[in-house]
Every structure is written in C-alpha cells, then in structure tokens.
Image (cartoon, grey):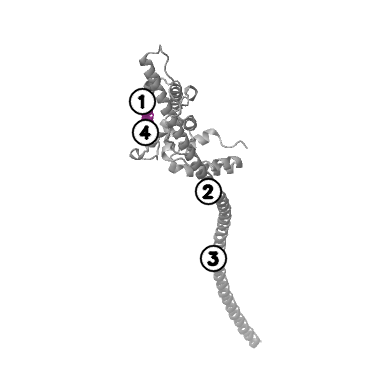
Amino acid sequence: MPGPSRDLVERLYAEPPDRFVAARDAAVAEARRAGDRTAAREIARLRRPTVAAWLVNLLALRRPELVADLVRLAESLRSAQRELRGPRLRELSAQRRAVVGALVAEVRALAAGVAGGPPAGKLPLGEVEATLNAALSDADVAEQVRSGRLLRAAHYAGFGEVPRPQLRLVTTAEEEPPPPPAQPRAELAETRAESAETRAAERAERAAAAERARRRRALDRELDRARGDLARAEAELTGAATAEEDGAELLADLEAELAELERRRAAAEQDLSRAKLARRAAERGVTAARRRAGEVEAALEELAAEEGTASDRADRAH
C-alpha cells in the first residue's frame, strides 16, 4: 500500500489543533474504508501540534518562499559567525530582527484567515518568534520548520555557531606569546581582544553544548515515555474503532430487521382490517338470507294450507 499522500498530511497539519484529532480520525476511517491499512496506521501515528507549532506549520505550508528566505538568512548568519566578520554580523542581526518581525506579522494574518482558529488575542506569537529565532541558529530546527510538521515550539539555548576551524584553544596555563618587535601596539591590542573573544566564545559554546546535551537526554527519556503512551493509546484506539465498526454493523442489521418487521406488521394489520370488514359483510348476508328463508318457508306453509283447504272442498263436492 502507498501510505498517506503528502497533500493529506499537509491538510491535516494546516488544521487548527482543536480540530486536528477529528480530521485525523476521519482520514484514518477513510483509509480503512479504502482498504489501505498501511496509510491508516501511518495517519493514526500523526501527533497533534501545539498552537505555536501549528502557526509555524501554517507559515511553512502557505508561504514556503518566506521560510526559504529565513533558511538562507540562517546560512548567511552561520557563515559570518564562522568567519568572525563583525560588521557583516551586525548587518545580518538587524536583518534577522526585521525578518522575524515580518514573519510573525505574516503568521498573525494567516491565522486570522483560518475559520475556527484561536482568537487573535490568544495566539502564542512569542513562542512563534522564539521558534523562528531558533531556526536561524540551529539547522535541525530550520529543517523541522521547513517541513511543516513541527509538533511544538523550539527555543535555542546557545549563542549561534562557534567558528571552530579558526579557533585555538587557550588554557590558563598558557602565556600569551610576545608580539614581534615590528608589530604595532594597536595591532597587538586587537589581537589580544580577538583572543579573549575567542576564549569567551569557546567557553560559552562548551556550556551551551553541555546544556543541550542535558536537555537532549531529558527529552529523549520523555520521548520514550511518550512513545510508549502513544503506542498503548493507539492500540486502545484501534480496538475501540474495531468495536465501534462491529457495533455499527450490528445496529444496521437490527434496524433493517426492525424495518422489515414493521412493514410486515403494517401489512398484517391491513389484512386483518379487510378480514373484519368481510366478516361483518358475511354476517349481514347470513342474517338477510336467514330472514328471507324464513319468509319463504312461511309462504310455503301458507300455500300448503290453502292447498289442503281446496282439496277438502273438492272432496265434499263429490
């Protein structure tokens, strides 16, 4: 079986979160009716996004070109960070704020055009902004945003990519090498400042990496538990759906039998009514026939009496 189409998945993730489960279950039922059990299972595994994630998905699905611009800006930012280009970083940072602000405004407009969506005053635009900023700093988050199937808002705990290829690790035991005799004092100060910035950036990256690793382990454990809960819930859902289908079929059969019995009862009532009318007519016929028979018998008796009288007269005359 081919599984669910991309258009179907995109339609589901464009639905507001409070309608997602109903739309997903309807798609599962439709796939089952079509005999595509693989698609039904895969659709049933789709998880409902949070409101913030739905808003980001709406942006990715309805305005993919804007998300592509965001991804390109993220690549430019990472390139500037790797090369330690201060002026370019400042320029891109200003552009970053403008782009994120414009995307948040676009998200608000898209949400207003969705029937049945959350009211404008309750949109978690702060989480949307945090997710877009995280996409600018983390390539994995950017890819999730571009997919249009984000499940929850993202937050970035680091400080962007650190230009590892151009950094030299300096420990406290090392001494700064003396500058060459011909090196100007201003150039030496700039070199030391860059070295200090490099060490600060390296420490910040190590701290951020440790924090990300800790969060990832915690999230992995939580994800394992959630997947277990999801598997159990899906098994219960499948059993309940099967029982519901069986019950619906039995009810339909019983309703059909009941309709047939009602039809036969109505026909029997009509036959009974006609039989009662025929019996009453027959009773009236019997009564009339009996009355007529009595009248004929009386007439015959009267005629016989007259005949007897006439015979007696004839005998006396002779």
- Quarter containing the N terminus: top right
In the image shown, does 46 or 277 lie closer to the viewer?
46
Whether residue 62 can be seen here: no
Q: Disc number at residue 179?
A: none
In the structure shown, which secondary structural element does the residue marked by tag 3 occupy? helix
| Residue 63 is covered by the magenta coloring | no
In the structure shown, which secondary structural element does the residue marked by tag 4 occupy? helix
| Residue 95 is covered by the magenta coloring | yes
Q: Earlier in the sequence, mark 1 or mark 4?
A: 1
Q: Is residue 8 left or right of residue 58?
A: right
Q: Earlier in the sequence, mark 2 or mark 1?
A: 1
Which segment did they paint magenta? 94-111
Q: Position of residue 301 (x, y in %)?
A: 60, 80
In the structure shown, which secondary structural element does the residue marked by tag 2 occupy? helix
Q: Position of residue 228 (x, y in %)?
A: 55, 47
Of all residues, the one furthest to the bottom in this rendering is 316
Q: Earlier in the sequence, mark 2 or mark 3?
A: 2
In three-dimensional space, the C-alpha distance between marks 2 and 1, rounded to whole angstroms, equals 41 Å
In three-dimensional space, the C-alpha distance between marks 3 and 1, rounded to whole angstroms, equals 92 Å
Identify the residue position indicated by label 2 in the image.
Answer: 229
Q: Name which quarter of the figure residue 17 lies in.
A: top left
In three-dimensional space, the C-alpha distance between marks 4 and 3, rounded to whole angstroms, equals 77 Å
Q: Disc number at residue 277?
A: 3
